Amino acid sequence: MDWKQIIEEVQEHHDFNQADLSRKTGVSTPHICALKKGTRKMPSFDIGLAIIKLHPNAKKLLGI
């Protein structure tokens, strides 16, 4: 998955900055920043799921 794109789409859809996304998901701001920059390639399952749940196409991304 392209986490940079997923995070950008979530932020755009909800008008979130990284701190907002951090509060909504319980994921630290530095972790979100690293995923968005690409310095961190793969989040844990729980973190990835927390971010994807906020995506406008969450069901499609989850294959349901």
Image (cartoon, grey):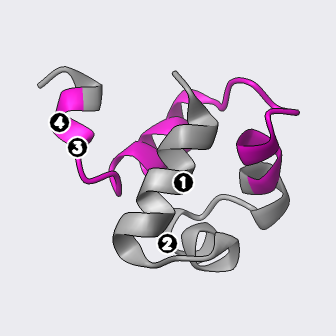
Measure the alpha-carbon separation of dots 1 and 3.
13 Å
Secondary structure, mark 1, is helix
For mark 4, does the 10 Å Cα neighbourhood hold few (<14), some (14 to 19), or many (20 or more) residues?
Answer: few
Question: What residue appears at the point 25 percent right and 53 percent down from the top-left corner?
Answer: 56
Question: What residue appears at the point 44 percent right and 67 percent down from the top-left corner?
Answer: 12
Instruction: Determine which of the numbered discs, if any, sits on residue 57 in the image.
Output: 3
Secondary structure, mark 2, is helix
**Which residue, given by chain and number where applicable, does mark 4 sit on?**
59
Question: What residue appears at the point 53 percent right and 29 percent down from the top-left corner?
Answer: 45
Measure the alpha-carbon separation of dots 2 and 1.
15 Å
| Front label number (2 vs 4) | 4
Q: Residue 38's image quarter?
A: top right
Q: Relative to the observer, which residue lies in front, 58 or 15?
A: 15
For mark 2, does the 10 Å Cα neighbourhood hold few (<14), some (14 to 19), or many (20 or more) residues?
Answer: few
**Which residue, given by chain and number where applicable, does mark 2 sit on?**
24
Q: Residue 2 colored magenta?
A: no
Magenta segment range? 33-60
Measured along the vertical axis of the image, is residue 61 above or below residue 11? above
- Kind of residue indicated by mark 4: Lys
**Which residue, given by chain and number where applicable, does mark 1 sit on?**
8
Measured along the vertical axis of the image, is residue 4 above or below residue 29? above
Residue 37: x and y in percent read 81, 43
Measure the alpha-carbon separation of dots 2 and 4.
18 Å
Residue 5: x and y in percent read 54, 40
